[in-house]
Image (spheres, coloured by chain):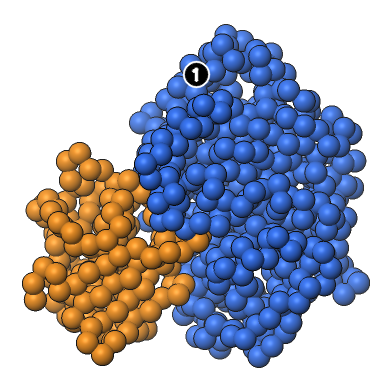
Amino acid sequence: MGEAAWRWRTIEHTGDLAIEVEAPSLGQLFLAGAHGLVGVLLGEEAGPEKPERPKATVWRELALEGPDREVLLVDWLRELLYIQMSEDLLLAEAEIGELAETRLVARAGFAPPPPGKGVERELKAVTYHDLEVSWRGNSWYARIVFDI
Amino acid sequence: MAVEGYRLEKIDDYRWRVPRIGPMLTEGLVFADQDLIPHIEQDKSLQQVANVACLPGIQGPSIAMPDIHWGYGFPIGGVAAFDLDEGVISPGGVGYDINCGVRLLRSDLTVQDLRPQFGKLMDTLYRNVPSGVGSSRSDIRLGVKQVTEVLLKGAAWAVKQGYGWPEDLERIEAGGTIEGADPDYVSQRALERGRQQVGTLGSGNHFIEVGYVREVYDEVAAAALGLEEGTVTAFIHSGSRGLGYQVCDDYLKTMLRASEKYGIVLQDRQLCAAPLPSDEARRYLGAMRGAANYAFCNRQMMAHWVRETFSGVLRQSAERLGLRLVYDVAHNIAKIETHRVNGSEKRVCVHRKGATRAFPPGHPEVPEAYRQVGQPIFIPGDMGRYSYVLVGTEGAYNETFGSTCHGAGRMMSRKQAKRTAQGRAIVRELEDRGILIRAASRATVDEEISEAYKDVKNVVEVVHHAGIGKMVAQLRPLGVLKG
């Protein structure tokens, strides 16, 4: 799959901030959601436009379990948000090793925010509200609401 | 699945009913006038009122204030009370920013006293109070033991360390220390986040606003609160920062499992909850109260720096300037309180998410100094218009579990607000109107433009006329520090 195979964009939400994500596979959907999270933190409204992110300097193995893939997606993004908030590291790249209905194993690479482009926005959390992960005939779709 | 097919029926000029349908266990009660209703109907907030009405053990109606807007789980501006035996507690009914709240300082200074030094004052304030994304003060980093003390003692810890005056504590909700906090139920992640961020404003809609009393509506109450026309005030709006967000996040996971374990049917996963008598609820209450205390401490420390700033710039002591705390009140919290339910007194768990406690005159939890007039309530507007001071009423105690509104309420998404601000110099526009802005991020200023919010005057007039709050004074901004 090429660079443009997945995309994310912010959508209108009065109180908080939400994104929609589309990707050809569930694994790419999780990656796209992660890039959407990073994009929102950097003040972007859609991606990938020119997703020039610094190369990963720190790698982590993440293994998550949840009751279903929706909760798993939220938990995945929560882990990434926690790492950003506690260590000021943003996801740069990731390899999804295993992704089943209730389990995700990934190797995630992080880097500090790009030079001259710090984190613009504080996200309090990734919520379960209005959450959706679905197959829409020809691509995977997710809607995620962040508390801001 | 969320409640579908709900309707809105007019009760009177300021009250609307969402009749009970389908899985709803009670009706919804919305405070609004005819002009606010179209704004409220624009998003999914009424559906959220209906969803909350489905939670087990709810007492009275699922209530929405006139500043209601679409949140996650509970609407922002939502109030719901639950029976202690049959009811539930839901972290989604408190929100991520546990004990987000407002405190107000008053002074003897007039606007004229301040004008010559005002730019310097705002610059100094911007340096002294950490604001913006991930902000922290490099000279303050607590050890885990100290964070634990903050969780237990709240604002009292801060005063003991020299941040503020002992008498401040008498003028904070719950005296600045909510009993029953249990740091053992707060995760290491939350504690770690708490170490770095105490005494910080944060970003988003948090702010410190230096303003003045523009108009007094109730002379007796204003005098009791120490507010006089033309005198300078300072608002601090912030909460429990990353520690609170982490507590909420941690317990949402716990409550998602608990909902399944106890067979609680959820209309929205963000409403996940546990029965109040359960171990899960006990642990959340212990952690949430700790986070609430952290927020009281946070605002106490910032108030100290506000005093230091005024004192340094104006070369007079804070005492001499009369920079006294009027009050500090939470608007994101769950508390066990006594209320009248079906004619008799009962202990219930009141969730206030984007709603302010509004206890009436004579209530034992209202500070002695305000016992005759009622508990002070602060309703900030947007950064370009005005804010209001109210006091609690018997009406609120009887009808809304002692609660009222908390702000103007957004009516534009942040994306829409940014579009509206595009090509404009918002900081300059406000400066032309005599309001100085100091902000860590231009994006935040654009997202927080006045037009993004309802006119808070309309919101406050609804609660005043409905009798769930009584207008005391209007405050106007002179300078706003944004994250």
Q: Position of residue B378 (x, y in %)?
A: 69, 43
The subunit carrying tag 1 is: B
For the colour blue, the matching chain is B
Lateral position of residue B237 relative to residue A104, left or right: right
Q: As displayed, is residue B480 above or below residue B378?
A: above
Q: Which residue is located at x 34 percent, y 63 percent?
A: A10
Q: Position of residue B170 (x, y in %)?
A: 74, 37
Q: Which residue is located at x 9 percent, y 76 percent?
A: A1
Q: Which residue is located at x 68 percent, y 65 percent?
A: B37
Tell me if I can see residue B458 in this picture. Answer: yes
Q: Quadrant of the C terminus of chain B?
A: top left
* Count of numbered circles on the image: 1
Q: Which residue is located at x 56 percent, y 55 percent?
A: B410
> Quadrant of residue B346 in the image?
bottom right
Question: Considering depth in this image, is B18 or A84 the residue closer to the camera?
Answer: B18
Residue topped by disc 1? B119
For the colour orange, the matching chain is A
